[in-house]
Amino acid sequence: MATITKKRIATDGQFGGVPYGNQSVLPYTLKTNASGAALDSDTTAAIGNGDKVILGILPAGMLVQDAVAIVSDAFSALVTVDIGFEYVDGVDSTAVPQDADYFFNDLALSATSRTRQTTVVAPVKLPKDAYLIATTGGAANAVAGVLDVMVKGELLGAP
């Protein structure tokens, strides 16, 4: 029976040069008011079917590995969401293409839940800052709701 060893096992970076490691969980929250509008946003209009909400920024150099979505206060009936990323500068990357449903595809927001990432994708290292985006589907939102998304990964520093 053969023994196969990957190259560079002794020199592959593990902790980004810091003694406490680089594993991180970055939290992002979407709260809506009784009319269905995103709180602390640039509009007072309710979130409509097909609207994109920018939840925050994933930093360049992050090795994105997993996510958890928690709906602690349900949104309107039939509301779903895709959660993914797009680059802040608006320019796609051929090495790591933008992906509007990288983390979740058609995640139901109409009932309380805790859901681990539903898409089966390989971890990617972001070459530049990216927005974490939530794109709604199914129906418009007309109620107060709360969605928390925790993105897990390693902060390896800008490429």
Image (cartoon, grey):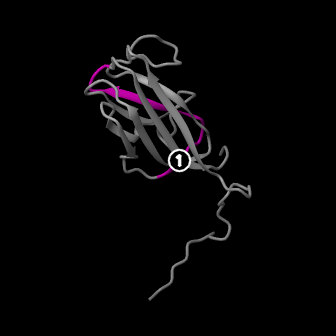
Q: What amino acid is labelled 1 in the image?
A: Lys
Q: Is residue 95 visible?
A: no
Q: Total label count?
A: 1
Residue 25, horizontal then vertical, whole percent: 56, 45
- The residue positioned 34% from the left and 26% from the top of the image is 75
Q: Residue 14's quadrant in the figure? A: bottom right
Is 136 inside the magenta-drawn segment?
A: yes
Residue 116, horizontal then vertical, whole percent: 40, 47
Q: Is residue 5 above or below residue 66?
A: below
Q: Is residue 99 above or below residue 55?
A: below
Q: Where does the N terminus fall, quadrant-wise?
A: bottom left
- The residue positioned 31% from the left and 21% from the top of the image is 49
The residue identified by callout 1 is 152
Q: Is residue 133 visible?
A: yes
- The residue positioned 37% from the left and 34% from the top of the image is 82
Magenta stretch, residue numbers: 123-140
Give the residue furthest to the bottom.
1
Left or right: 141, with 129 as reference point: left
Label 1 sits on a secondary structure element that is: strand
Q: Is residue 17 above or below residue 92?
A: below
Left or right: 158, with 151 as reference point: right
- The residue positioned 74% from the left and 55% from the top of the image is 18
Instruction: Answer few, some or many: residues within 10 Å of disc 1's Cα (few below 14, many 20 plus, some between 14 and 19).
Output: some
Is 27 inside the magenta-drawn segment?
A: no
Q: Residue 74's quadrant in the figure? A: top left
Front residue of 10/145: it is 145
Front residue of 36/61: it is 36
Front residue of 64/47: it is 47
Q: In this view, does 66 lie above or below 32?
A: below
Residue 63, horizontal then vertical, whole percent: 56, 49
